[in-house]
Image (tube, rainbow, N blue to C red):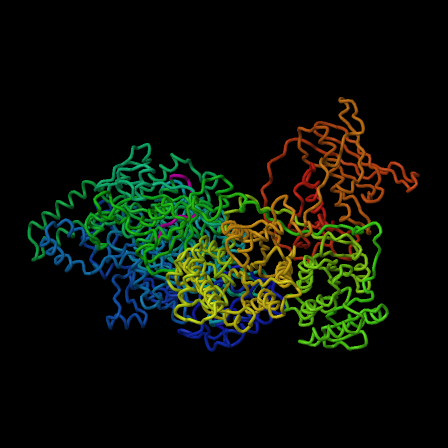
């Protein structure tokens, strides 16, 4: 079953792909889905097609509230959700729509209007216009036009009709009524789930007839004086102005939306009034999309609602823009003006995966929004450049070409100037094929703040019906207008969906003040091209920061005085500027005084505060004018709106009061005097009056003053308006649409009229303009702007409960608090910045976003710089190091000899070793149940290991001398395919080592060795085998004999030979690797993060969902608390200890008083429970201490995040069902996990001979089994980030920790194995935490014994946050344990050997005359300096890389011109390879450098081929010739991100079958990709800071890495 315009599911397998974040639009009940995601695997496409074609996905469900979030049944829903590819979840669908315009009460009726030949205009029926009308256009304060688009025969939604009839809901005003009508339509067939977070974003303004009449009543009452007079005027005006509201505050924009949503949306829904004039509803849609994609909302309703009154008819007439003949002729030569209409429209948005699962139909795709402000000229006239910028930005979202756009629903107002500018701008951007252009305004009028969404519905209906309605009231273009490549169709044009391509349309909406919006739309049909994304992808890793502020108050106190007042330490400013705002000098004003007096004071206040900032700081945004926007938080009507309402209604007011029987002549007299005073200070309505009363033009004034072109608008969320403005600014900064956001919190209306409307006491309102200058943290660092605070916002709590920093602002000294209305949040932010508090929450009295303010001086952890005192960040590298005999007389001893006990984990290994064991007198024990026992082979059944070992020992003459453990992951891919749990045979093999060691002879002549067979993919050990390597690392520190583990990619037979060689080698490492026959050892390389990362942007966004095991205690609790302070996440802690009750006295006891508390507890318990054993009481008190720590952690986190955002679940990680249950609870509440921290762990240190199996398993399984249980439970969807807390003992080992060390090495290996999956995983290997954690009491002893550097809590927290800074560091396993230059006592030295000082070249052999500018050197490989040669092999031989030849040439040239830098190479010729082994007899290479021109030096490298006895076989071989250029370094080029390329498994030069083998220092290219366009990789060297590569004249490693990219894939043209 399909409907017109909807795409059948059958096309899905043909789709090539979807880009990220595409936005699919649907209409309620439209049937079939439209498309799926990009470049999917074939099985994903097939599964999606099957699901989307199913009845569950395609059938409309009707209006319903589904208990568990799935229509139909939970089982069906889960199947759908599971099978939808993940990219589909990033798209957004419109699943409902509602509309009301003149002549149409629904979208279907609107489609009929679009095909009729007559317009819908007429005179108003709901109010009298006589006293506001005069046919003379020049008549003062009158309109000469009575006709507009007023609603007639409006049919409210059935539910709304019932509510009105039963009086169960009252509208308050027409704007609210139309908005509720459209909301009901848009929700009619939308499935909603329990717990859905909803949002409603509406383009609107406080401009309805109801508010106008309320303002007239309030103004007259305020002028009345006495209470009796006021009552008389209320009675008189109440009879006349029947639309006036009983509670005018309820028809302010924010309350109007709240009232319209009453009973339809949950009370905690996000609501926002958006004001960019006629483009408002397009901005509202874009803000709604951003809320969905940010994960803040599950369902959003977006659009606009706009109704006009008498004042607007007068002011628009004086703007000379209204049509006097009752027609709108858009784009036509006879155009003579516009007519405004009452209109409303709403679209409902969901994420696409939800829409598909809920069975919602799909109608079209949103292909990108572009917003701009003209930023020049007059706010009354449009600018072509600003409009073109919005179009280009919308198309740039998906990079669409102009020719792809087939039709534009234009703004088309019928004004000559406006239409001419729009036509020429669109024509200039049209493609060679041109496009169609129409407007709906000739038929239904200009919908004002709802105009954009009306045109969106227009376009979607055309997609649905396959037809573009012809334009009415059009003959031809105006003379002189360049409109090439634009066609206005006057008849309907068929527009069917065609195979293989997607229809494309766009909508223009341009607002008064120069606020432009352009939205691209696409049909739902399948196409070969990927589907478009609906919005730019936000950067979640770059926080919004405050880099400047300024205030403008009456009396204008300075910044210091303002800061003191905000801290409560000084007097405040005056309350108001007075009845007349003091105009600045003309030089600053930059407009005629008449114009300045005709506009609202907030417009002047805004330019004043911005100019004051510029005077003090300059234009910080100078380099970013096009991407600097102004977002104003303003509440309610402006003072000018109220004043002009009163002025143009003066005749009607006086006549009404004079003729009403209840009034007295004195009432009329007082009112007349008041009106005369108003007329004396307020000019008659003129062409500045209409834009001058609008709140959105506040922002536009600033943009025009400073020539800005970024997103510019106003928002109204009542007294939380600045908080809402900050939230919107953060969204646009995150996507990069803005680089700088100027957020204005402003109030200029402290008049008695506003006090009456807002329902506040007299003289309680105050005026102020506050400017907050914001940008992204990265941009602030780039420009060196001083960061005052990090600002984060969220909409999770809309209850309106006051925040920590938003109580009443101080008064001016009289003791009364003042209300700054929309500016209150801005002042609260400044107070938080100056409060000295490390973190403050700003939340208004009205519902709105919460704002988290972290002043820069109070950030968690140290200032930018090295994050930890004395601890160096390091990473692990593998370096070539041949074995060195332990002594000159050392001889090889075979791997298997008499008295050797061999433990194996496979029957195959037992069979392969049985003959050799029989021959040499060894004995084998296998943990594989498939093992066939024999005279030399035994199978150890579970639980019988010690018995079998004892029997084996009893077979011989005494204890075993040697222990050999053989484990393998080769040839057993199914058992060891990562990330499966280690097989039982391997776990039991590890456990068998415990009793086996006890069977060894006590003398020191034996050994313990492990031979581990591993493919060594990526040159890393398989995680499963680390259970044995980690065991032996700690065991080596306990036993006096030789202990080592050998990990090899060789066969079993070859591996035994390697064990034989290792047994007699000097032990500098416990674990060695053999790869392709070459020996490698582990080496720690310093890898400090860049200084600017510390304190930088988090990889997690605000409100991220964090799950932490062990997170209620110890180091994990400290880390989570630091993260909570930074981003205020939603936290779920998993722990084994129940969070029970703790006596309040113990909860509050300081840590240093706990020993005393223990003594008091023991004394009390012994007295009350005599005879109780002291150990039992101590155990009880320890339990209380653990519970105390949990409760204190929860209290801290809830203070930072909010009481409803922190949860604690009791869960034993060793029990998979408990972990699954915990995951179910988390996903049910949150739907996702952004970060999982696996920090749980226990330590039960004991020597091998004393360690019990139960303790061993408890320690190991908490980390290892817990890891796999978490992986399984939190898999759908998987966490975006995964952090394991490991320990440096996983590398160094630790005596007594043969269980803890391997568990930590396992987590490090797991992160390396998982590093290229969907989840970005990393493991931090910690040193000792001195103040918390499992070993804090032993930290001093262990630090002295092993040389570990301890961390305090602040250090550890800073480390954790720096590792979460975006972008995440490439290496997934950092170590934080080693001090620079501090060798660890008692454990192997993991640092690199020191290289000799100097560069590659010593002194020249001889210097040629200075005039010749030449010199010659002899170079020979040095075994200490040139260790890198052993890691660069060709056919198994060390080969000098071409990059090192260039380094030699660069150093030689630089020696001749030491004041210049190497800038490049030319004419490079590599003639003969130079094989040179520094440990053999390396050849001598002659290097000649000579100047050939200014800054140019030719260098040659030559050598002789010499036999071992000294005979020259080939003289003067030419290895390299190159010209080196020197000079000043040019500026760095601007980096452009490359397009993504298909991933390669690994760099080709590290594959076993490559003739060139690169390892160690040359292993720099990670995550390689290749395609026909070329190759790419992430470059990440691991280098000793004082090694030879740090002293080269050129970055040789980078040059080598770049050259390798040419081997990845053929270049264009096959080169």
Residue 1247 falls left or right of residue 525: right
Residue 1377 seen in the figure:
yes
Name which quarter of the figure residue 1407 lies in. top right
Q: In the rendered picture of this protein, how many numbered marks are placed on residues?
A: 0
Residue 1138 falls left or right of residue 1518: left
Q: Nearer the viewer, residue 1336 or 331?
A: 1336
Residue 399 seen in the figure:
no
The answer to if 713 sits in the magenta stretch is yes
Name which quarter of the figure residue 9 lies in. bottom right
Residue ID at (40%, 73%)? 65
Coordinates of residue 742 in the picture (x, y in percent): 40, 45
Residue 1376 falls left or right of residue 1038: left
Q: Nearer the viewer, residue 1474 or 210?
A: 1474
Q: What are the residue bounds of the magenta stretch?
A: 705-715
Coordinates of residue 1185 in the picture (x, y in percent): 45, 62
Q: Nearer the viewer, residue 685 or 964?
A: 964
Residue 747 vs 500, above or below: the answer is above
Coordinates of residue 1244 in the picture (x, y in percent): 58, 63
Coordinates of residue 1522 in the picture (x, y in percent): 76, 36
The answer to if 1506 sits in the magenta stretch is no
């Amino acid at each position: 079953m399909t409907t017109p315009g909807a795409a059948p599911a059958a096309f899905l397998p043909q789709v090539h792909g979807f880009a990220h974040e595409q936005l699919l639009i649907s209409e309620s009940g439209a049937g079939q889905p439209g498309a799926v995601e990009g470049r999917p695997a074939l099985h994903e496409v097939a599964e999606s097609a099957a699901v989307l074609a199913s009845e569950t996905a395609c059938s409309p469900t009707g209006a319903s509230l589904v208990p568990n979030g799935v229509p139909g049944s939970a089982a069906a829903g889960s199947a759908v959700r599971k099978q939808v590819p993940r990219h589909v979840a990033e798209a957004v669908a419109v699943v409902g729509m509602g509309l009301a315009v003149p002549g149409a009460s629904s979208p279907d009726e609107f489609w009929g209007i679009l095909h009729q030949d007559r317009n819908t205009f007429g005179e108003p029926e709901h109010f009298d216009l006589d006293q506001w009308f005069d046919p003379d256009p020049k008549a003062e304060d009158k309109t000469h036009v009575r006709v507009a688009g007023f609603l007639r025969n409006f049919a409210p939604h059935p539910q709304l009709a019932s509510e009105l009839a039963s009086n169960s809901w009252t509208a308050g005003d027409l704007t609210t009524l139309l908005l509720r009508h459209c909301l009901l339509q848009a929700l009619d067939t939308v499935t909603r789930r329990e717990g859905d977070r909803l949002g409603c974003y509406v383009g609107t303004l406080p401009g309805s007839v109801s508010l106008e009449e309320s303002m007239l009543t309030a103004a007259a009452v305020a002028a009345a004086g006495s209470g009796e007079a006021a009552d008389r005027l209320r009675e008189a005006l109440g009879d006349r102005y029947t639309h006036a509201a009983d509670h005018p505050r309820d028809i302010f924009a924010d309350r109007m939306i709240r009232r319209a949503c009453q009973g339809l949306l949950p009370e905690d829904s996000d609501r926002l009034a958006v004001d960019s004039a006629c483009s408002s509803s397009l901005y509202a849609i874009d803000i709604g999309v951003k809320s969905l994609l940010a994960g803040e909302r599950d369902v959003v309703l977006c659009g606009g609602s706009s109704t006009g009154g008498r004042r607007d008819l007068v002011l628009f007439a004086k703007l000379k823009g209204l049509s006097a003949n009752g027609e709108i002729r858009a784009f036509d030569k006879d155009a003579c003006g516009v007519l405004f209409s009452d209109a409303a429209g709403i679209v409902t948005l969901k994420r696409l995966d939800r829409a598909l699962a809920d069975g919602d139909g799909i109608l079209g795709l949103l292909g990108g929004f572009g917003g701009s402000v003209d930023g020049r000229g007059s706010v009354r006239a449009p600018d072509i450049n600003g409009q073109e910028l919005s179009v280009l930005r919308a198309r740039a979202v998906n990079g669409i070409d102009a020719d792809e756009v087939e039709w534009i629903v234009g703004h088309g107002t019928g004004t000559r100037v406006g239409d001419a500018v729009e036509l020429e701008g669109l024509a200039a951007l049209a493609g060679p094929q041109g496009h169609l252009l129409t407007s709906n305004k000739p038929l239904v009028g200009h919908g004002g703040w709802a105009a954009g969404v009306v045109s969106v519905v227009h376009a979607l209906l055309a997609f649905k019906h396959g037809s573009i309605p012809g334009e009415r009231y059009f003959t031809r273009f105006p003379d002189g207008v360049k409109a090439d490549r634009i066609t206005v169709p006057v008849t309907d044009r068929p527009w069917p969906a065609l195979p293989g391509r997607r229809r494309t349309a766009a909508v223009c909406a341009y607002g008064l003040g120069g606020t432009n919006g352009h939205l691209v739309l696409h049909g739902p049909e399948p196409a070969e091209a990927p589907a478009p994304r609906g919005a730019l992808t936000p950067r979640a890793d770059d926080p919004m920061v405050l880099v400047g502020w300024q205030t403008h108050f009456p009396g204008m106190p300075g910044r210091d005085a303002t800061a003191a007042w905000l801290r409560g330490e000084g007097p405040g400013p005056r309350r108001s500027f007075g009845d007349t705002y003091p105009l600045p000098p003309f030089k600053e004003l930059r407009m005629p005084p008449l114009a300045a007096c005709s506009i609202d004071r907030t417009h002047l206040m805004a330019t004043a505060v911005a100019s004051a900032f510029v005077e003090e700081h300059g234009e910080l945004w100078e380099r970013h004018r096009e991407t600097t926007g102004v977002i104003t938080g303003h509440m309610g009507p402006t003072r000018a709106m109220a004043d002009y309402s009163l002025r143009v209604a003066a005749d009607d007011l006086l006549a009404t009061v004079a003729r009403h029987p209840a009034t007295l002549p004195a009432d009329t007299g007082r009112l007349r005097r008041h009106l005369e005073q108003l007329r004396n200070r307020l000019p008659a309505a003129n062409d500045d009056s209409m834009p001058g009363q609008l709140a959105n033009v506040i922002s536009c004034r600033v943009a025009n003053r400073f020539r800005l072109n970024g997103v510019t608008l106003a928002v109204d969320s009542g007294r939380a308006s600045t908080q809402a403005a900050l939230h919107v600014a953060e969204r646009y900064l995150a996507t990069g649409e803005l680089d700088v956001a100027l957020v204005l919190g402003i109030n200029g209306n402290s008049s008695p009229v506003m006090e009456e409307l807002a329902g506040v006491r007299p003289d309680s309102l105050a005026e102020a303009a506050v400017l907050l200058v914001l940008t992204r943290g990265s941009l602030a660092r780039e420009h060196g702007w001083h960061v005052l605070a990090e600002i984060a916002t969220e909409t999770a709590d809309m209850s309106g409960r006051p925040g920590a920093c938003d109580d009443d602002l101080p008064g001016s000294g009289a003791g009364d608090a003042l209300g700054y209305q929309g500016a209150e949040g801005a002042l609260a932010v400044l107070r938080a910045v100056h409060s000295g508090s490390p973190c403050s929450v700003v939340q208004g009295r009205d519902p709105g976003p919460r704002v988290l303010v972290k002043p820069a001086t109070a950030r968690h952890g140290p200032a930018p710089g090295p994050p930890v005192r004395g601890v160096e960040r390091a990473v692990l590298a593998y370096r070539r190091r041949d074995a060195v005999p332990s002594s000159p007389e050392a001889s090889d001893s075979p791997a298997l000899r008499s008295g050797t006990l061999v433990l194996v984990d496979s029957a195959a290994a037992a069979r392969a070793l049985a003959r050799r064991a029989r021959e040499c007198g060894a004995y084998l024990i296998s943990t594989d149940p498939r093992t066939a026992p024999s005279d030399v082979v035994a199978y150890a059944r579970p639980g019988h290991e010690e018995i079998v070992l004892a029997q084996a020992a009893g077979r011989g003459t005494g204890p075993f001398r040697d222990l050999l453990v053989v484990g393998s992951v080769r040839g057993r891919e199914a058992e060891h395919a990562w990330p499966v749990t280690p097989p039982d045979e391997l776990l039991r093999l590890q456990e068998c080592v415990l009793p086996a060691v006890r069977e060894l002879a006590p003398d020191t002549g034996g050994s313990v060795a492990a031979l581990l067979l591993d493919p060594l993919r990526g040159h890393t050990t398989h995680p499963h085998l680390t259970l044995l390597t980690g065991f032996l690392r700690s065991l080596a520190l306990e036993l006096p004999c030789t202990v080592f583990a050998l990990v090899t990619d060789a066969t079993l037979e070859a591996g035994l030979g390697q064990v034989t060689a290792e047994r007699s080698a000097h032990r500098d490492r416990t674990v060695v690797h053999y790869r392709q026959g070459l020996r490698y050892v582990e080496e720690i390389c310093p890898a400090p993060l860049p200084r600017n990362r510390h304190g930088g942007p988090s990889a997690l966004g605000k409100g991220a969902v964090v799950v932490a095991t062990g997170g209620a205690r110890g180091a994990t609790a400290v880390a989570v608390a630091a993260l909570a302070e930074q981003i205020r996440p939603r936290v779920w802690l998993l722990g084994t200890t129940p969070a029970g009750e703790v006596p309040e006295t113990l909860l509050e006891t300081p840590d240093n008083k706990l020993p005393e508390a223990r003594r008091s507890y023991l004394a009390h318990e012994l007295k009350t429970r005599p005879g109780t054993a002291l150990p039992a009481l101590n155990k009880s008190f320890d339990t209380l201490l653990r519970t105390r720590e949990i409760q204190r952690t929860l209290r801290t986190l809830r203070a930072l995040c909010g009481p409803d955002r922190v949860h604690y679940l009791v869960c034993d990680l060793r029990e998979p069902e408990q972990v699954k249950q915990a995951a179910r609870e988390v996903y049910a509440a949150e739907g996702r996990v952004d970060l999982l921290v696996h920090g749980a762990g226990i330590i039960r240190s004991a020597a091998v001979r004393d360690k019990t199996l139960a303790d061993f398993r408890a320690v190991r399984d908490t980390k290892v089994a817990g890891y796999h249980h978490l992986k399984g439970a939190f898999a759908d969807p998987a966490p975006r980030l995964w952090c394991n807390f490991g320990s440096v003992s996983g590398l160094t080992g630790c005596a007594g920790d043969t269980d803890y060390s391997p568990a930590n090495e396992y987590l490090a290996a797991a992160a390396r194995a998982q590093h290229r999956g969907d989840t970005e995983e990393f493991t931090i290997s910690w040193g000792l935490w001195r103040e918390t954690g499992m070993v804090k009491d032993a930290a001093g002893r262990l630090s002295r014994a092993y040389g570990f550097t301890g961390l305090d809590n602040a250090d550890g927290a800073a480390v954790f946050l720096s590792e979460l800074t975006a972008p995440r560091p490439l290496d997934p396993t950092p170590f934080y344990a080693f001090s620079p230059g501090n060798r660890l006592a008692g454990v192997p030295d993991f640092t690199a050997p020191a290289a000799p000082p100097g560069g590659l070249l010593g002194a020249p052999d001889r210097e040629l005359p200075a005039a010749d500018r030449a010199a010659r050197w002899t170079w020979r490989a040095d075994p200490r300096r040139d260790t890198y040669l052993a890691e660069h092999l060709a056919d198994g031989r060390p080969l000098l890389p071409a990059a090192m030849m260039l380094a030699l040439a660069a150093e030689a040239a630089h020696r001749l011109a030491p004041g210049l830098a190497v800038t490049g190479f030319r004419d490079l010729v590599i003639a003969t390879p130079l094989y040179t082994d520094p440990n053999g007899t390396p050849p001598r290479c002659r290097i000649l450098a000579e100047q050939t021109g200014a800054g140019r030096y030719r260098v040659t490298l030559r050598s002789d081929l010499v036999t071992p006895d000294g005979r020259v076989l080939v003289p003067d071989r030419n290895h390299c010739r190159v010209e080196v250029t020197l000079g000043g370094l040019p500026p760095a080029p601007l980096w452009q991100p490359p397009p993504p390329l298909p991933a390669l498994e690994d760099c080709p030069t590290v594959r076993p079958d490559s003739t060139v083998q690169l390892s160690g220092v040359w292993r720099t290219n990670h995550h390689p990709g290749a395609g026909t366009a070329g190759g790419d990789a992430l470059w990440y060297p691991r280098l000793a800071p004082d090694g030879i590569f740090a002293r080269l004249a050129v970055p040789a490693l980078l040059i080598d890495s770049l050259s390798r990219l040419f081997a990845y894939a053929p270049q264009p043209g096959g080169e």
